Structure formats: C-alpha cells, structure tokens
Image (tube, helix red, strand yellow):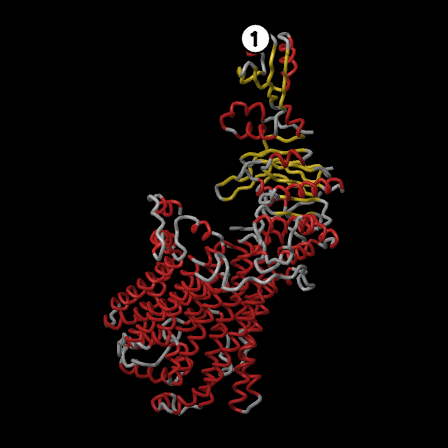
Amino acid sequence: MTAISVSGLVKTFGTTRALDGLDLDVATGEVHGFLGPNGSGKSTTIRVLLGLLRPDSGSVRLLDGDPWRDAVALHRRLAYVPGDVTLWPNISGGESIDLLGRLRGGLDPRRRAELLDRFDLDPRKKARTYSKGNRQKVALVAALASDAELLVLDEPTSGLDPLMEAVFQECIREARTEGRTVLLSSHILAEAEALCDRVSIIRHGATVQSGSLDELRHLTRTAITVETARPATGLDALAGVHDLRQENGRLRFDVDTDALDGALRHLTGFGVVGLTSTPPTLEELFLRHYGDELAEDGASAREPVRS
Amino acid sequence: MSTQLSGASARPAAPARPGRSSTTAGTAALFRFALRRDRLRLPVWVAAGTAMVALQSVSSQSFYDTPGALAAYRASVGSNAATIALAGPPVGLDTVAGAVAFEISATVMLIAALMAMFTVTRHTRADEEAGRTELVRSARIGRHAPLLAAVLLSALACAALAVAVGSAATATGLPAAGSFVLGASFGACGLVFTGITAVAVQVTGHTRSVYGLVGGAFAVFFVLRAIGDIEGNWLVWTSPIGWAQATHPYSRDELLPLLLCLVAAVALTVAGFALLDRRDLGAGLTQPRPGRPAATRSLRSPLGLAVRLQRGAFLAWALGLALLGVVYGALADSVETLIAGNEQALAMFGDPDVGELVDAYLSTTFSITALLAAAYAVSAVLRARSEEGEQRAEPVLATATSRSAWLGSHVAVALAGSALAMAASGVTTGVVRVLQTGEAAALGRMVGAAVAYVPAVWVVAGLAVALFGLLPRLATALAWAAVGLFLVITMFAGSFDWPGWVSDLSPVSWVPLMPLEPWTAGPVLALTGIAVALLATGFAGFRRRDLATG
C-alpha cells in the first residue's frame, strides 16, 4: 500500500528547473522524512502533491488519486501544514482553526480543545499578534484535530520552542499509532531521526537516497576510537578505512559499514584495551551528501536503496 | 538594501549623542534606498500626471481654436453643475489655457494625492506591517528616520510633478507663469496628502486601512470643494483641493493659497511624528482587541471567509457611494438655479427644458458613480490576488475547497457588492429628489438609472477576473490601468476630439444615459454577455494554472 508515489517528477519555473526527475514513495501508515537543504525542492514537491502546482512531466499519485484532477476529493482525506504559515491578520487563531477544519470537512472539538491545551495556544488572539511559532501552532492544531488519513507537514516545527517540539513529536507518534500516514519535510535531522520510519533525501530537485534509517546507515561509516596494548599497524592498508589518525595514544578512524568486521578482526591482534564506536548520525549522512568537498563519494552513494 | 544600509553602519560608531539628532539618524541612507526602490514607480506617477496635462493642452488648443468655440464651451460649463462638481471653479475660462486648467486639474490633483499616499505608505506602514522596519530599525537608524525619509521622498516627487507639469504645459504653448502655478498647485496638493498619509500611517496598523483613511479624506475634501464651487461659497476654503485650485492658474495666478497647503502639510507631518512617538513599532494608536476563541457559524465556507474578509471594504464603499448619491441629488437643485441665472446658456440651449438639463446632469453623475463602483469591484476581485500572492490561498485550497469555489466566493462579493453599492447611490439620490420635487416616482427613476450601470460595472469586474486567471502577476497593474482608462474616457471623451470608437472602449459609455435617455435592452444584453465571457475565461484560466505566490 502506498500513500504517495512519485516518479520522474519535473517542474520548471521559467528557466529554473525546480524538480528534476524526483522520486518519492511513501507507504501507508509510515512516517516518512522528506529531507533536503533549503531550496532543494521540498516545498515545490509538496505543492505538486496538493494540486497547487501542475507537474511538467512524471507521474504523481496521492491516496490512489491524481492530485491535480482529484484535488478536492483528495483534500478531504489529508491535512496540510505549510512551511511559512500566513494567516488572516484580523481573524483569531481559534477562528482560523475552525475555518480550516470545516473547509476540510469537520474537526473533532474535543481533540481541538486538547491540542490547544497541549500546544499552550491562546485561540482568542488575532493572527497579526501571533509570533511565528504561534502561527505554526495554529496550523498544526488545525491539521492534527482533523481525522485526515494523511498529514503533509512542510517543516512544521520551524519556530517551535524545544518544549513544543517535544509535544509535536508526541502528536506525530500518536498519529502513527492511529494508522495515519505522515509526510514530514524537514531539515532538522534529529527530528527526522526521532520520528521517521523511512526517509528520502533530495538535492537539486532529485532524490539522492531513500530508505529506512538502518539502510542508510549501511551506506555510511562508523567512527571508531580504539586503544590497543601494542601499537596497531597496517590499518591504513585495509580497504574501507578512512581518515586514520593518532590522538592521545588512541587511534581514531572511520570505517565503511561493510569493512567493519575486517577492521575489528585486525585490531584484536594488537590487544584491544578500550573501544568506542559511534554510529553515523543522519547529520553525517546529510553532510556527506551535501558537502561538496565529499563529492567524490557521491558516485557510489547515489544508488538508491529501496525497501 | 544591504549596500545602502551597511554604508551607514560601517562608519565608526558615533558616540551616543542624546537629543534630537539621534532620532533621525540614518535618514539619508534610507532616503537613498527608498529612491532606489521607487526609481521606476515615481517617474511613472510623474509622467502620468504630466501626460494628462500635455494631452489636455494639445487637445483643447485644437478643439477651442476659435473664440466662438471657446465662448460656447464657457457657456455650457458655466451652467453644468456636474462638470463644476467634478472639475473645479469655472474661473478663467475666457482663455484656452484657463480651460485646460479647469478640465485637468481635478484629475491631476487625484494623481498627486494617490502618488503621495502610496509613496509614504509603502516606505512606512507597509514595511512595518511586513516586519522589514524592525530589521531596519535594529541598525543605526533613528526612530523618526523611516517616516522622515518617506515624507522627503514624497515631497521630492511632488516637486518633480510641479516642475514637469509646468515645463510640459509651457512646451505645449501655454503661458509659462500660469503653467508653473498650475504645476505648483498639483505639487502643493500632493504635499498636503503626504502629511495626511504621515498621520494615517500612525493611526492604523494596516496598509489597507491607511488607504481607506486617506482615500476617505480625499473624497470628503473633494465633495466639500464641489459643493463650495457650485454654491460659490466658503466651503471651498475647508478643502486643501479647494486651496490648490484657488490659485486660478492662467487668470489670477494666486500663490498665497499654496502657503496654506504648505502650512497644512508641515503641521500634519509634525503631528505624524508626535503620534509616532506615542505608539509601539508595528502597532497603530489602539491596541488590537482579542477575537473570538471559536468561529461563528457564518465562517464555514469559502464564501463566509470572503464575506468576512471583504465586509469592511464593502461597507466603506457602499457608504461612500450612498453619500455621493446624497450630494449629487442635493446639487440637482443648483443645476436649475445655475441655468436660470445664465442667459448665455439659456440662449445656447435654445430655451431648454430645465427638467431635461437636470436629467442630463443626473445621468452624468451616475456614470461617475458607476466608475467608482467598478473601481470597488476591481479591488474586491483583486483581493483574491493578494490572498494568493501572500500565501493565504494555499491553506484554503489544500482543504476540500475547489479553485472555482474559492475564486467564486471573492467574485460573488465583488459582483453583489458593486450592484448593491450602485443601488444604494440610486436610492439616496432618489430620496433626495423625492424630497426636493415631491414626486414619489423620482425614487424609482433614480434607482433604475443607477442599476442600469450594473452590467457595465460587471464587465470591468469580469476583466479583472480574466486577468487574474490568465496573467496573475500582472493582473493588479493591468486591471487598475483599465479602470484608469475608462475613467479618462468617461471624463474627457466629450472634451477631447476623439473618434467614437475610443469612447466605446469603456463599457460605461455603452449604457443609455438614464434618466435622460430611455432604457434599452441591447447594451444590457451585450454587456452581460461580455461579462459572462470574461468571468468564464478567468475561471477557466485559474483552474488550469499554477498557484502564483509572491
């Protein structure tokens, strides 16, 4: 079951090629991280998924429908939180929540009250007087109080404080428990790491990698710090060992995941006294894909991994 | 932006100087930056005003090329209350130059006032509302600097308009002294509205409300001077537009009234600074009241939202047009007095039926009201464009709201609102006429005459919808340009020596001049058909295109 299926999506604005053959697959019931740096095409993709922009080419399916042609019918089943929430200055937050909910087909008043409480939002204030974070909360409450089966969230936590970020993560976990599908665009990697079952990483309007976090970790390196009884030699000759250096009598190096076993076997021959291994963070994945100085690694990493 | 502002901040930090100078620090940098942002806009405003004068000058000189033609013109204008209400005091009409000043001054005064209003607002309240002023003021920029820079920029534009108009009028063959007095009168009018805007941007926190306040002030001052000019009384002196026109270019060339304008402009600007000191950044003079914690039942559909967003503007326009209807109706009595007292006119019209002349006057006033209703309809349609451009359409269209329903709700407000506003002006004129004449039938005739313009108003609204659907990014500019064109056609088609097809460009000129002429179905059906076609084009275009934000 797929909630979202995009392949070869192209969208140009004048001479700018915003989306350049983007692929995205989101399974029903999963929380899918949609990651990429600023300007990489995340919001454009989401606008195409919402039928607000018309694709130039490629196929786009959303909840088994065509997002452009069946926009109204599909929108009854989804809720959207824009990245840059702008509200009507003279309308209060509570009114905006009700309006957006009703236009979607109704929201649960009990849930609305509960979410207002959890997000600590005063619904009486006119939108003009809300801070960025509070405008974000209005959109989040409106989306989460609906019974939508798909939540499309475009950088929903930019502007939220850490306390509210925690509330948001709780709400997303609850949504997953209820069986809802979530597409979460973000560049906050800790958030994606905490919430997402699978992620897609895009760059320059194209998908560079997608898969579960475990699968992605396999594509990258583990950082090892080791202290041995006798000076360890010959590591630099092993394939898959990078960036070897000596620090305070300890050896530090990064090792490709498939070369990890060989490296450890080699080290035991020198009497391991202490060892720490740090799994790659999403941050490192990200930096590896976007750091231009690591471009030479790009060729091998570009192979998409599908589950 | 960064280059200009960093230029100011890169200087070694001045020691903190208490006192006056610090609140205006950075004015020069902001002024240069504002000049750069408006390097196209201001020349367009100045050129528009100057071109109107030059065109009028050339056209009038060929139109009134004999003393007889000029005398006939003088006779007809001297007896036409509608023309006097729209143009100004019928003074100095014994020369072509005087006729040029009479015909064009009200329009260019409006251009000068709008230029001042948009220029000052753009660099003060609009920036503040968008949060840019906060960024600017965090640099080494004094509290008063943004307003001072905006006022200076507007004053510079007014001066440029004065010089350009004076030069253009002289170049087209009018006496130089009078030409520069004419130009100065426009500049002075612009200065007063610079001051009025400087106050208005402090009073309210919203750009839209600023336009409402300043536009309302212009309307009030225009009506005051219109009544004063027709009645020939002191009311003229309650209006800055009256002061500027009291210069009587080419006949008396009075400069003293311009001093009044200057004093008022300075006083208003000083008041603006005083109010600025009494309010918070981003706020108006009053604190916003809290709203409802939950939406009422009316806010449950796209139409409910459009009505909620647009009701304030609708009420203001409807009230304005209704009041205008009262004024026009009240002045109908003066038409009779004017004619009775003008033997030349009586001779020219060949002992006319006075009732017919009153009808002619009333039909002219309704065509002006129709243009104002069309301007309202365009602003109501373009609300959809600003909702789209400012990304407020996106969350609504991401719900189960179709594009047609969303656009249709704003269009419905525009069509119904403009029709209601037109009817309101017919009702008020009618009631006043009933009170004047004692004939109950006058009410129906006036309402009919006003409502007859509704299809023409809807064509203009339809044009705005078509532009929105097909050319979203240009729609605002093009729709207003069309309104301006129709206004010029209606106001000047008679006095410019234009071929008939030019006046046919304006849908308003298709409508029979009721109550003078009888109602005919042909133009109404044609206009309705065109309106429907334009609306269909706009809706089809919007359904097919990308949402255009920013």
Image coords of residue A142 (percent x, y) = 67, 51
Q: Position of residue A111 (x, y in %)?
A: 73, 51
Q: Estimate the x, y position of residue A7 in percent, counting from the top left.
A: 63, 36
Residue B39 seen in the figure: no
Determine the chain carrying the residue at label 1: A
Q: Nearer the viewer, residue A210 or B53?
A: A210
Above or below: residue B73 compared with residue B280: below
Local packing at callout 1 (Cα closer than 10 Å; few below 14, some 14-19, many 20+) is few
Residue shown at 56% from the left, 10% from the top = A237
Q: Specify the quadrant of the image occupied by residue B403.
A: bottom right
Q: Quadrant of residue B98?
A: bottom left
Q: How many marks?
A: 1
Residue B79 is at least partly visible in this image: yes
Horizontal side of residue B513 vs B403, given as left or right: left
- Secondary structure under tag 1 reads loop
Displayed quadrant of residue B58: bottom left
Left or right placement of residue A47 versus residue B505 in this view: right
Residue B146 horizontal side relative to residue B404, left or right: left
User: Mark 1 = which residue?
Assistant: A233
Q: Amino acid at mark 1?
A: Thr
